[in-house]
Image: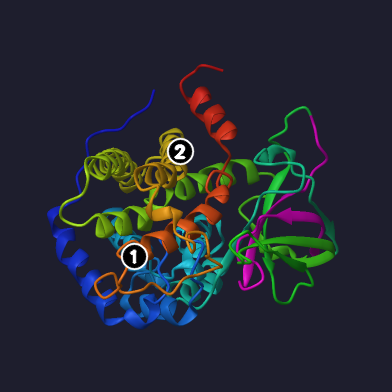
Amino acid sequence: MLRFEPTSLPENTEPLRQEVRDFLSREGAHLQSRNSDFTTGHDPAFSAKLGAKGWIGMTWPEAVGGGECSFFERYVVTEELLAAGAPVAAHWIADRQSGPLLLRFGTQAQKQQYLPGITRGESYFSIGMSEPNSGSDLASVRTTARREGDGWLINGTKLWSTDAHRNHYMVALVRTEAPSDNRHAGLSQILVDLRNDSAQIRPIKNMAGGEDFNEVVFEDVLVPADRVVGEPGNGWQQVTSELAYERSGPERFLSAFRVLVEFVRAAGKRPSPTEAALIGRATAHLLALRRMSISVAGMLQAGQSPDVEAALVKALGNDFEKLLPEMARLAAPDALAAPDALASSGALAVPDPVTSDDRWQTFRATFADTLLLSPSFTIRGGTREILRGVIARGLGLR
């Protein structure tokens, strides 16, 4: 049964929200190219500044550099950074899921080695789950790791690994035992040093001109035995718990948020009836998804594992992220008919909407950028089909 208990952010998080906004107003040099999609904007200097503020690893123990804050406080910081279009890609995966995974299943030595660098905004992680011809069916992974002396020898290929060409480490899901009738058995997670372990990293250029995704090929890559996260063979339990962190945050419905922001700015104080309808409909969607996401944050704060609820947030959030640009297109067809409407290529320098002669200029640029990035929204973290399967099983329907 799904549980979305009514949950509100505590009042004591409001000063923190204002602190984040004040910080972002001072750091405008890092926000010249704004995009609320968390995979864009790889800015190590900005990540280091967030680390210095204590805004990475916020819920983690102080012993590993964390802030021992609540999940609600982390939610507020995350929400403000994404809403502002801040460049958070460098540290994002390490903060959101690789770090929590190590906190829960890693050895003390692993925690001390990897977590402090993450909290300082200096150490970045990629995800090694998806593979060619496997989609989001994690149980079908074919990358193997077998014992070789004092280490593990890895062979196989990982696909869609965000920023692997820039990051330091990957947590790779591998098969450490031969396949059996139990598809979930024999899987393990292993830490790979992307800069020193001889993995071949091949960036994949997307339609927007960026190279966020990568193919990572392992050909007899030998890693030390102490790189296994948790117990060998426990990978399925670990990776499914990790996905709860990936699927439930505000990033799952804010990736297209800048489209709405710039639409509202362009429409002005007297929007047309069509423009007003779009603003009202989109805002209603956002508020409902936000309430659900905050409820999941409350479950995480209570130490629960809301896997099914997180899957539902992502499924509905991704639907909204894909729908929002189309809603905007239908509400402002004349604005998008301009010659430069789809002239985007990669990150955009956002013009000042106050001084611009064309009030729709920034909207067009933001719309184009989001439209080119949007095909990835429903792939990362699990496709629609996989998520619906998770939800159906959680409801006892299959």
Q: Which of the 4 image quadrants contains residue 87?
A: bottom left
Q: Is residue 156 magenta?
A: yes
The reply to whether residue 104 is visible in this rendering is no
Q: Residues within 10 Å of mark 2 (few under 14, many from 20)?
A: some
CA separation, marks 2 and 1? Answer: 22 Å
Element under label 2?
A: helix
Residue 319: give its label: 2
Element under label 1?
A: helix
Q: Which amino acid lies under the numbered mark 2 shown in the image of this protein?
A: Asp
User: In this rendering, would 397 be left or right of 60?
Assistant: right
In this picture, which residue range is highlighted in magenta? 151-180
Residue 25 x, y percent position in the rendering: 25, 77
Residue on which the image places disc 1: 81
Q: Which amino acid lies under the numbered mark 1 shown in the image of this protein?
A: Leu
Mark in front: 2 vs 1: 2
Q: Residue at x 28, y 69 (%)?
A: 353
Q: Earlier in the sequence, mark 2 or mark 1?
A: 1
Q: Is residue 105 magenta?
A: no
